Amino acid sequence: MPTQNALAMSSHFIVPVAPDFLAGIGVGMLLDRVREIGEGLEVDLKNVGIVIGRAGRKSKHRESIAAALRKKFGELVFPTEIKERVSVSEAASLQKSVFEVGNRAASREFTAVCEEALRRMGWN
């Protein structure tokens, strides 16, 4: 119910996904479910895109999942991936933003994702 309430008050949404097999499978199902909820609530929800997050160390498996997501969903997948970093987890546990913990690479990734989201929504 909280998710439906959030969607009822939204105009746009972003799908975060980890580069692993089960999460990759779930994206299509999630998009279908959000569409159904939007129709049921009579809300025109616009998918801003899919952000690959928690991307760990390079591995052929993770890269193949990311490539499969890009192939299936095309331009919906943001070009920037959010890497898995201890500083991001620490920021969350300290109830701080990623910009306050001093990791420049993480700050650049989050900034790029935010700028891309705003551009896609026409708010740049």
Image: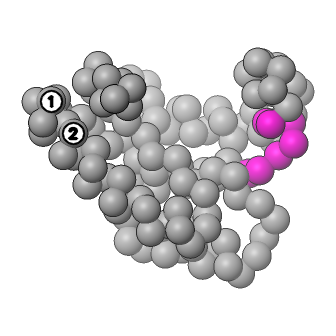
Residue 88 colored in magenta in the image: yes
Please tell me whether mark 2 sits on a helix, a strand or a loop: helix
Q: Is residue 117 left or right of residue 85?
A: left
Where residue 47 sits, quadrant-wise, is top left
Q: Is residue 23 left or right of residue 102?
A: left
Q: Nearer the viewer, residue 39 or 82?
A: 39
Please tell me whether mark 1 sits on a helix, a strand or a loop: helix
Q: Are marks 1 and 2 in contact (CB under 8 Å)?
A: yes
Distance Cα–Cα, label 1 vs label 2: 6 Å
- At horizontal 46% and vertical 51% (from top left) the residue drawn is 50
Query: As displayed, is residue 52 above or below residue 70?
Result: above
The residue wearing badge 2 is 37
Query: As displayed, is residue 22 above or below residue 115?
Result: below
Q: Nearer the viewer, residue 120 or 65?
A: 65
Q: Which residues are magenta?
A: 83-89
Crowding at mark 2 (Cα within 10 Å: few <14, some 14-19, many 20+): some
Q: Position of residue 92 (x, y in %)?
A: 76, 28
Number of dots carrying numbers = 2
Q: Position of residue 23 (x, y in %)?
A: 52, 62
- At horizontal 19% and vertical 36% (from top left) the residue drawn is 38
**The residue under label 1 is which amino acid type?**
Leu
Q: Position of residue 9 (x, y in %)?
A: 29, 19
Crowding at mark 1 (Cα within 10 Å: few <14, some 14-19, many 20+): some
- At horizontal 74% and vertical 51% (from top left) the residue drawn is 83
**The residue under label 2 is which amino acid type?**
Ile
The residue wearing badge 1 is 41
